Image (spheres, grey):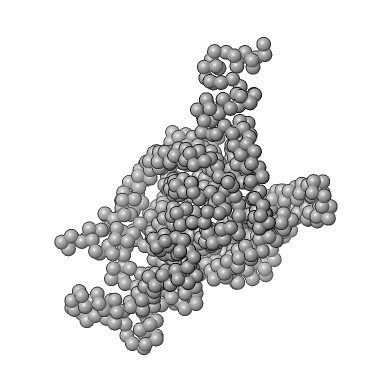
Amino acid sequence: MAIGEIIRTSQIWKSIFRHPMPLDRRNRIVVMLTNFFLHLHPVSIKKQGIALSFTWCMGGVTFFLFLVETVTGVLLMFYYRPTLEWAYNDILALRDVTSLGILRELHRWGAHAMVITTWLHMYRVFLTGSYKPPREFNWVIGVILLLLTLLLSFTGYLLPWDQLAIWAITVGSNMARATPILGYEGPGQQLLTIGGIDMITDGSDARFGLLGARFVGEETLNRFYVLHCIAIPLAAALLLAIHFWRVRKDGGISGPL
Amino acid sequence: MHSNGLFLKDVAGFLGLYYTGLAIMNAIAAIVFWQKTKQPGWAAVWSVFSVVMLVLASLALAGTAELVPSLPMSARKLVNTLSGPVLYTLGTTALLTVLFIFRKFFVQPMVAWTILNGMLLVMGLSMADENFSSIVMKADNVPIVGLVFLLAFFTWLATSQAVVNDERIKQGLPPMEKLADEKVLVWPDLVYTELICMVAVSAFLLLWAIFLQAPLEEPASSVKTPNPSKAPWYFLGLQEMLVYFDPWYAGVVLPSLVVFGLMALPYLDFNKKGNGYYSIEERKFSYLVYQFGFFELWITLIILGTFLRGPNWNFFGPFEYWSPYKVEVLNNFDLPQMFWVTLLDRPLPVASAGSSGLVQAGTILLREAPGLVLMGIYLVVLPPLLAVTIFRKFYAQMGFIRYMVMSNLMLLMLTLPLKMILRWTVNLKYIVSIPEISLNF
């Protein structure tokens, strides 16, 4: 017996994969139904639905980049401490001391790429009218995922704690200061007073809620770190699951009727 | 920056590789045109172009700074002098409009190939300019260069399919997508495509990570403000809007409206056609609105904000040195100023000191009356007016609520280009300016 055959008929192999090798038509169908990772897919699909000129593969690439970001992100968390004392030095060490020091590069360029592929995915879905009934709500979920992608990128931007980081976040978060009514420089914030005491100050407004402080400081670093590593990825993972599930439930990839 | 010689030596190696890449790319294209599509004439053209690229590559690698191919100084100066926010915006608008109207011409493979090579050549020649390349090569800006080329490619890909489909639909035929109707098994046809995509993306990302180091500047310091201070690149469109609006609108309200508008899109677009295939003719209105928002109000503003806005958020030409000492005269007026002082030759209405709150509020309303009336007409009178004129059919199909949401979203989206035009033409700063409650619009 050939070695491949021995492996494929062994008890261990057969206990892991619930089906024989997908070499004939029957098993190619069975594999899609019995494999956890593949069951997201349908068994068969219209040829048009897998043409790269039609799909651009951008949704898939975006999800793959999300996985890349998760893996490299976890590895980065081994090296990085989100404190004023260590954040910058850890990133510096990651570049200069760690072997194969491209972990941060993979993470950063993957993040930029993910923003771009999300836009391209959305662009394709628009251009093929794929948001039309019955897929309206999946488009809405997609918009939220786009927002989460941008927020992931934005919160991660602060973590290296260099000049580029804090000033980009300062510029970005200064906007929140001008939130109508809830920002202390926003229009109408003067209206929220109780007994002559201003309720909206630089220590209680929308920007303070975002930064955890009156300016971008250690509280912000901690807050953004938690958002970046835990809160937003969890939210995104949940919505991704619903997004994929809805693709199937809404009739698979769109195509002319 | 006048260290041109040293800079050119640094960039020469990169440019040598770049032109060699262009030469190889066009040599392959020439073979394809000759063998596959049987166009020997075009094959000859691209062979010659390929040779020219090789010559440029060898010039770049010759080791002498003077030989590195670049745009002539006079051309760069001309571009710098001519460029400004007005010309940039009008120019990109005109360009996109021409591309849209003559899309049948531009989607032809040979035209698209010529444009791509033109873009790459101009890019290469510009890279030999120190000011240009110092901004474009900035590590975090590289993705935007990629975005420009990707968007050009995918827009071409989509439009060329839409043009074919529109032609077919006109002839009563189904869209091309309908022709590949037979079903195939996901294993192997789709899962292998996905695997290849994953490998390709991983390889691309690894190469990118190896050749381009992630930026790391000096340690954060809250007392040393860099000039310019910029948000991450994907938010620079919003930062650019700050030129025309206050942060409450440009940074909070407009982005929220963008998100809301995108979410509302499937519920506002009642057109059942064009679902599941590329087409433009069947859904021209929604297509144009989306493209206007995406390209005009998002992408071009990001490019402007990243590459052309320097210290103090002043505009700089693509080949201009980002001098922090550049001064731009700002001579903008508020509408009340224009109305009361300039037009009526009267002082602005001011409540006398110590008057009651009601009087003060009334005076403010009187002072701002011209702007408030204009805004009222724009947001309250215009939607019903449009409903009985150019949007009559829409109103009939959409019903009151959906129509009002759509028309108001569109009018609010148009506030940005309108404010731009008013700024450039009559130096308008604010239409309504009530600093008493921090409300400027």
Decide which of B250, B377 is in the foreground and name it. B377
Drawn side of residue A206 relative to residue A150, left or right: left
Decide which of B263, A145 is in the foreground and name it. B263
Decide which of B331, B303 is in the foreground and name it. B303
Which quadrant is the N terminus of chain B positioned in?
bottom right
Q: Is residue B349 visible from the viewing direction of this image?
A: yes
Q: Residue furthest left?
A: A195
**Residue depicted at x 36% and y 78%:** B370
Decide which of B213, B345 is in the foreground and name it. B345
**Residue depicted at x 55% and y 28%:** A32
Query: Is B409 above or below relative to B51?
Result: below
Drawn side of residue A224 relative to residue B8, left or right: left
Query: Is B222 above or below relative to B366?
Result: above
Drawn side of residue B129 relative to residue A210, left or right: right
Image coordinates for residue B26, horizontal then vertical, percent: 75, 50
Image coordinates for residue A224, horizontal then vertical, percent: 38, 45
